[in-house]
Image: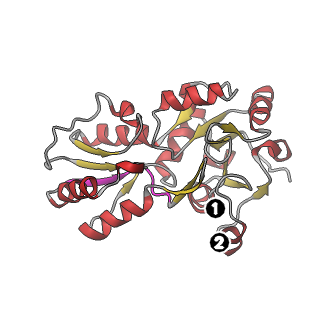
Amino acid sequence: MTLENVKGFLIDIDGVLTIGETAIPGAREAIELLKSRGSPFRCISNSTRKCRASLAARLDRLGFAIPKNAIFTPPLAAVKYMEETGKHRAYLLTTGNVDRDFAGACTDEGSNSVDYVIVGDAGDRVTYASMNRAFRCLMEGADLIALEKDRYWMAPDGLSLSAGPFVTALESATGKTATVVGKPAKAFFDLAIRDMGLAAEEVVMIGDDILTDIGGAQAAGMRGVLVRTGKFRKDVFEKSSVQPAAVINSVGDIGSLI
C-alpha cells in the first residue's frame, strides 16, 4: 500500500528499530533506504532510561548510522517546558542515566519544596519511599510532569510496566493531572516535525503502540503506520477504535509505503 504525499517519517525506536540490544530484522536496511531516497526522518522514543547520547551510541553499536540530533526523547521536551515556565527545581523519579539530559536545567536540593515532580520509567527506583516523596512534593505544591504515560513496553525479557501506572497512581492520590511531554503529546511530535521543516500532513509516524504512536500521531495531524513487532498485540489492535493508515509486518517493509 503506497501512501500519497509522504515527505518525511517519524520512527519509534523501541519495538520498531530495536528490542533491547538487538536490531529488528530489516530495520537497518529501512533506514538506509530512506537515506538513499533523500527522505527526511527523525527517530523518537518514549524510552526514559537512557539519555539522548546513550540512545545514539546504542543505535550506533547496532549498526544504525543515526546522528544524535535526529533523536527526540521526552527529557528534551521537559527541559523546553521548564525553560518556558522559568521554573527549575525538580524531583526526578527516573533511572539509568537520563538525568544527564537535565544537567544544568533543573536542581534538586533534597527537600519536598520543588516546582515539579518529573516521572519517567524508573524501574527498580519505584519504591514506597520514592513514590511517597513524589506524593509529598505534589501535596506541597509541585506540578506533575510525566515524561511518558505508556502502560507497558517490550523489554528484552518480556512485557514490562512503564511509567504510566505510577503516574496514574500519583494523580489518583493527589487529585492532580500530569502534564505529559512525551508521546502522545502533540507538542512532542511537533518538536520533531518542525525539525524536519515539514507539515504534519506530510509526515508518517511508524510505531508499535496503537494508542500512543498511532492515536497520538493522528491527533497531531499525521498518519500512523502500525508495525507487527515490539509490543504489538493482535487482540489489542482489533479492539481499538484507532485505525492506522496501514499495518506492516515490520519497519523493513517501509519501501511499500513510498
Q: Secondary structure at mark 1?
A: helix
> Which residue occupies 70% across, 71% down?
235
**Magenta segment boundaries in residue numbering:** 142-150
Q: Quadrant of the C terminus?
A: top right
The scheme the figure's colours follow is: secondary structure
Q: Inspect the image, locate mark 1, and give the three-letter code of the amino acid beneath it.
A: Ile
CA gap between label 2 and label 1 equals 8 Å
Residue 26 falls within the magenta-colored stretch = no
How dense is the environment of label 1, judged by Cα within 10 Å: few (below 14), some, or many (20 and up)?
many
> Which residue occupies 57% across, 41% down?
44
Residue reaching furthest to the front:
157
Report which quarter residue 42 is drawn in. Answer: top right
Q: Which residue is mark 1?
A: 210
How dense is the environment of label 2, judged by Cα within 10 Å: few (below 14), some, or many (20 and up)?
few
Locate residue 221, reporting x and y percent: 60, 54
How many numbered marks does the figure carry?
Answer: 2
Q: Which residue is mark 2?
A: 240
Residue reaching furthest to the bottom:
239
Residue nearest the observer in this picture, 50 or 222: 50
Q: Inspect the image, locate mark 2, and give the three-letter code of the amino acid beneath it.
A: Ser
Q: Secondary structure at mark 2?
A: loop
* Residue 107 appears in the picture as rendered: yes
Residue nearest the observer in this picture, 103 or 134: 134
> Which of marks 1 and 2 precedes in the sequence?
1
